[in-house]
Amino acid sequence: MLKSLLLAGALLATFLSAGASADNASPAGVWKNIDDHTGKSKALIRIAEVNGEFQGKVEKLFLSAEEDRNPKCVKCEDSRKDQPIIGMSILSGLKQDKQDIGEYDGGQILDAGNGKVYKCKMTLLEGGKKLKVRGYIGVPMFGRSQIWVREE
């Protein structure tokens, strides 16, 4: 009986520690963004950690048959103006929040659709399977969020 209780306790501790480590997963990887207006996938974004900051580049666009196969950021107002969106850096400067594991802030995100750059924060959800990406002006309350899904 005691052995069964000890074994059950060990298994529970292992399960709980595995769950805790999954919640601390990194946002590095490939993500499918889901448009908050249409609910459809628009792109695959590869997020990488470089010198303690997270950056993201567009790896693939999900385009309809009538859309340009190699669209450019015609509305961008910085060095990305008229550059191809595929391969473009759209996320930069995000750092892990020291007080809230799973939160990343201090960065910027480009909306290639309108060419505007917004402040950005990200939050890992569901043990790192989803990523809430919020672009905003001024304070996070004035913005919009998308849920991105990790590609396996």
Image (cartoon, rainbow, N blue to C red):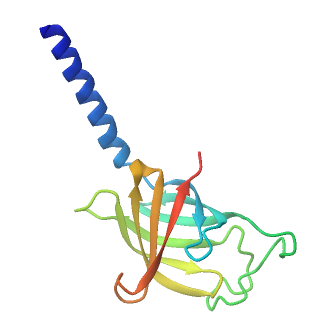
Vertical arrangement, residue 97 with respect to residue 130, above or below = below
77 or 63: nearer the viewer: 63
Vertical arrangement, residue 86 with respect to residue 119, above or below = above
- Residue at image position (64%, 81%) is 112
Instruction: Looking at this view, name the residue that lies furthest to the right.
Output: 66
- The location of residue 92, given as percent across then percent down, is 49, 72
Number of labels in the image equals 0
- Tell me the quarter of the picture where residue 95 sits: bottom left
- The location of residue 4, given as percent across then percent down, is 20, 11
Would you say 131 lies left or right of 44 here?
A: left
- Residue at image position (46%, 80%) is 144
- The location of residue 127, given as percent across then percent down, is 39, 48
Quarter of the image that includes the C terminus: top right
- The location of residue 136, given as percent across then percent down, is 43, 83
Instruction: Looking at this view, name the residue that lies furthest to the left.
Output: 2
Vertical arrangement, residue 12 with respect to residue 40, above or below = above
- Residue at image position (22%, 19%) is 8
- Tell me the quarter of the picture where residue 106 sits: bottom left
Vertical arrangement, residue 14 with respect to residue 80, above or below = above
Would you say 145 lies left or right of 83 here?
A: left
- Residue at image position (52%, 58%) is 48
Quarter of the image that includes the N terminus: top left
147 or 90: nearer the viewer: 147
